[in-house]
Image (spheres, grey):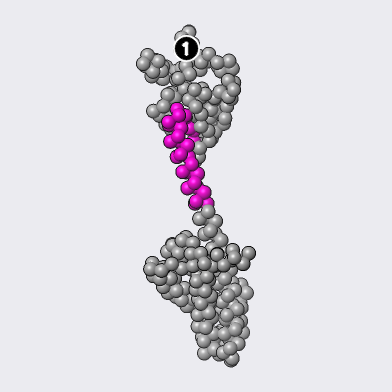
Amino acid sequence: MAEDTRDFFQRNVAGYLLKPRNQIGMIAFVAAFALLFINLFTPYNLPESGSMGTTKFMYLVWSIVLVSFGLVIFFLSRLTMALWTKRYAINNLQYVVWVVMEIIVVAVIAAVCFFCIHVERDFMTALLKCLIYSALLIIPPYVAAVIYRSLQDKKSKLNKIEEDLDKAITQKAAGRSIISFYDERGELQLSLAKENFLYIESSDNYIAIWYLKNNLPRKQMMRMTLQRMAEQLQGTSVMRCHRSYLVNMEQVKVLRRDKEGFFIEMGINGVPDLPVSKTYSEEILKWLSM
């Protein structure tokens, strides 16, 4: 356990904590938390001091001034950190020490201000109180921000892994005559060997993908419009034969015409004949004559 802790502190700080946008977001979050905390819990008891005024409005004004001083300190601190980390690595221990120093600097400046304006008569008492209050104002939002950024970073990495996996599957599928189906969010839902894929049936905002499993027809529902799926499968052997159907032309055994029009037969038990509308009949006939 001790060794794990030592390794953690010696490890370089996570890159996402040093990104300028995340640094600015963290400072803003700390400032908002501090302003809310000071006005809800009035830790500095400024309204009780005659020199500060006795109204909540005056307390709000002085809390804004106090937080503004803190913002300047944090901005200068994080600017220094950004310049430092461009040339040198910083580990987790150094990062924690840096945060502690920020708390101490804020506390010292606040204590000097309160001592000078006679909010506290004893400087050491003012410094002790300001150290406690500064820690309460800074540490919780820091921890919350770090946890949030950590979760966001993990989510981003997982999404990247999923994207890489999808690409790998797609690339592998291309070499093995496999068709992959993605839903409306772009997430892979199903990959099939071409010889097992039969047809797709529209059902409002959903589609039913029909395929063979152990020589029996099975289907999988997916949230996607037929039009978008047709666009996704352009350039493959999948063609639209009807406003409600896409068909794998490599599975077509017979194109039959009767008094009701053209119908596609696949010669597989349990698979119905699919209608071919006039709009798509020419393309279907062209495919079959190739």
| Magenta-span inclusion, residue 167 | yes
Residue that extends furthest to the front in the rendered view of this protein: 3
- Which is nearer the eye, 267 or 223? 267
Q: Nearer the viewer, residue 112 or 191?
A: 191
Magenta stretch secondary structure, dominant: helix
Is the residue marked by circle 1 packed among few (<14), some (14-19), or many (20+) residues within 10 Å?
few
Q: Secondary structure at mark 1?
A: strand
Q: Position of residue 189 (x, y in %)?
A: 53, 35
User: Which contiguous range is marked in magenta?
Assistant: 155-182
Quadrant in the picture for residue 123: bottom right
Residue, far bottom: 121
Residue pictured at 57% horizontal, 30% vertical: 220
Asked if residue 156 is among those painted magenta in the image, a careful observer would answer yes
Q: Identify whether 5 is placed above or below 216.
A: below
**Residue 4 horizontal/vertical position (percent):** 59, 63
Q: Residue at 51% across / 24% down in the picture?
A: 197
Residue labelled with disc 1: 254
**Residue 225: % across, % down:** 49, 32
Q: Is residue 25 visible?
A: no
Location of residue 164 in the rendering, given as x and y in whole percent from the top left corner: 46, 43
Left or right position of 251 against 219 = left
Left/right placement of residue 158 relative to residue 89 reads right
Residue drawn 43% across the image and 71% down it = 81
Q: Residue at x 37, y 14 (%)?
A: 289
Residue type, mark 1 in image: Val
Residue 157 seen in the current view: yes
Q: Residue furthest top?
A: 259
